[in-house]
Image (spheres, rainbow, N blue to C red):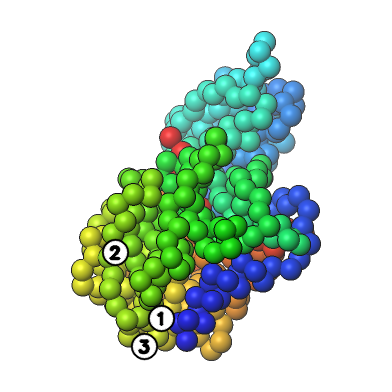
Amino acid sequence: MIKNLFSRTFVILAIGFTATFAQAQLRVETTGVGATQIPVAIAGFADETIAPQQITAIIKADLARSGYFKIIDTGNTMSETTSVNYGEWKSRGADALVVGSVQRLADGRYDIRYRLMDTVKASNLSGFGQVAAPDRLRVAGHKIADDIYEKLLGVRGAFSTRVAYVTKAGNEYRLEVADADGEGTQVALRSNEPIISPSWSPDGTKVAYVSFEAKKPVVYVQDLTSRQRTVVANHRGNNSAPSWSPDGSRLALALSRSGYTQVYVVNADGSGLRQLTNSNGIETEPQFSADGQYIYFTSDRSGGPQVYRMSANGGEAQRVTFNGSYNISPRVAQDGKTLAYISRRDGRFQLYALDLTNGQELRLSDSTKDESPSFSPNGKYIMYATGRGSLAVVSVDGRVRHRLTTQAGDIREPTWGPFMK
């Protein structure tokens, strides 16, 4: 059974794409809302029409997509220096008010300033200024949305982070990187051979992945700025499933160099290979915990694929999943409290979350072909592939859902990047 699993994970995913491809831009559809929605009035920023991107449109889309905010359109523009009648905004149902301005500088960049106010407490909550080139205006808007999210919810926003995924059309595979809202797509790698298992480095500057361009699975690390690539694992047999240690110094891998697929660790430059598991089964899909103390992985040592945990130095492993006979693709939230994985039940491959503190399990999807879960860096959302040509995002409580679709081709293997410094 588990061999069929790995065929599905490492071969069918990569080779089975058949749709045609054009330049893909993800379209986001949001359903559901959080347990509590905070009403936020967002005024048009003064003079923002001079910029090629409307900053407030980006902020509104980010906050609305989160599911935790009710956006109130003020119908006018207000700069950060405008005098505010807090009582008036409170009477209009707004708990918070966002204002700002955009000014074009002599060098062509834009000076963007914003202010966030608490209308209930009649106080200033936050605000800052930033200078952005025309091609960085979306990032500037995302950073403001991140700040609003954090100030009003107490959790760091992840709108300015990026995601990576693989698209396929015809004979071309593309490793693409985009903003978390699907905009700003860039191609990191094109190949006529399958690309699978992308994994972000903790600093967000590199992506590890498996490429079949050598007519076998080989693990590469690619610098996203210079595009320079390093072969990290090209041993006999399959080299697969790379994932980074939290400090970026090592990668966990699944290699079949000794026969059965086992879990290894290797330095980020490919040196210092060390085997961590040694069984007669298949041990794969290793993932470091956020504190670097543990590695979660999938193993069939109990007769069917289940999630296990062991020390990052190897040794005895403890079984983590017990519900259902088929649980794969473990991912652990940054706080170490939630495990996301794909479980097959009644013939459906669906996304589940397990509370590691109390053992309670929650099914997060209604679809049937879910794959490749990945937590947002703030741990509040999980992105995954679901069916052809579609990615989905769900909040860890299951209340808010997004679907990211493209009409241009198949899109798989999503991985959510880290916070950028």
Give the labeled residue for mark 2.
Answer: 275
Q: Residue at x 76, y 66 (%)?
A: 19
Circles 1 and 2: CB atoms closer than 8 Å: no
Q: What amino acid does circle 3 point to?
A: Gly
Q: How many marks?
A: 3
Crowding at dot 3, Cα within 10 Å, few <14 / some 14-19 / many 20+, comes out as few
Distance between the alpha carbons at the discs numbered 3 and 1 = 7 Å
Residue 385: tell me if it is visible.
Answer: yes
Residue 335 to residue 296: above or below: above
Give the structural element (helix, strand or loop) at label 2.
Answer: strand
Give the structural element (helix, strand or loop) at label 3.
Answer: loop
Give the labeled residue for mark 3.
Answer: 303
Give the labeled residue for mark 1.
Answer: 305
Q: Residue at x 62, y 30 (%)?
A: 136
- Residue extending furthest toward the front: 236
Of circles 2 and 3, the one toward us is 2
Q: Residue at x 63, y 35 (%)?
A: 138
**Earlier-in-chain disc, 1 versus 2:** 2
